[in-house]
């Protein structure tokens, strides 16, 4: 049985994820779980950094531009915050996570 390699280019963030990119799906699932179990304040303090860093670095390896990373993170945030009863906290979590993703994207480029 052979394994399918991950795509070598950035998948379109407006399209469904490539079915053969298992790594991308695993990273997204891990990040959503981390977001569901944290608060905006915890994200600002770095609580989800390991998950978001691994996800963002993978997207960088696929040559995704920063705007694609932001779109993908926002899609994941919609999944993670869908059932949150406190919409103010959901908004704060989204803002904090997008900011962390951008910071992580550019941390090695400066």
Image (cartoon, rainbow, N blue to C red):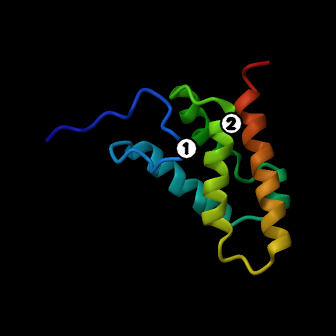
Q: Which quadrant is home to the N terminus?
A: top left
Residue at the outermost top position: 110
What's the mark number on residue 13? 1
Q: Secondary structure at mark 2?
A: helix
Side of 9 relative to 20 (left or right): right
Label 2 crowd bin: few (<14), some (14–19), many (20+), radius 10 Å? few
Dot 2 corresponds to which residue? Answer: 67
Q: CA distance from mark 1 to mark 2?
A: 9 Å
Side of 38 relative to 14 (left or right): right
Sequence-wise, the earlier of marks 1 and 2 is: 1
* Quadrant of the rendered image containing residue 42: bottom right
Q: Secondary structure at mark 1?
A: loop
Q: Position of residue 53 (x, y in %)?
A: 65, 39
Residue 86 visible from this viewpoint: yes
* Up-down relation of residue 16 to residue 85 (above or below): above
* Up-down relation of residue 35 to residue 10 (above or below): below
Q: Position of residue 50 (x, y in %)?
A: 65, 45
Tags 1 and 2 touching, CB below 8 Å = no
Side of 63 relative to 5 (left or right): right
Residue at 73% in and 64% down: 38
Residue at the outermost front position: 14
Side of 27 relative to 99 (left or right): left
Q: Position of residue 24 (x, y in %)?
A: 47, 44
Residue 53 visible from this viewpoint: no
Label 1 crowd bin: few (<14), some (14–19), many (20+), radius 10 Å? some
Residue at 80% in and 74% down: 87
Residue at 63% in and 29% down: 65
Residue at 38% in and 42% down: 21
Number of callouts: 2
The residue lying toward the viewer, choosing from 30 and 24, is: 24
């Amino acid at each position: 049985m052979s394994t399918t390699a991950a795509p070598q280019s950035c998948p379109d963030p407006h399209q469904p994820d490539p079915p053969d990119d298992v790594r991308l799906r695993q990273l997204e699932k891990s990040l959503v779980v981390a977001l569901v179990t944290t608060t905006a304040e915890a994200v600002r303090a770095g609580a989800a950094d390991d998950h978001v860093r691994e996800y963002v670095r993978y997207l960088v390896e696929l040559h995704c531009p920063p705007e694609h990373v932001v779109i993908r993170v926002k899609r994941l945030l919609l999944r993670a915050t869908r059932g949150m009863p406190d919409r103010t906290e959901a908004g704060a979590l989204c803002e904090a996570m997008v900011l962390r993703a951008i910071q992580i994207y550019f941390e090695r480029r400066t």
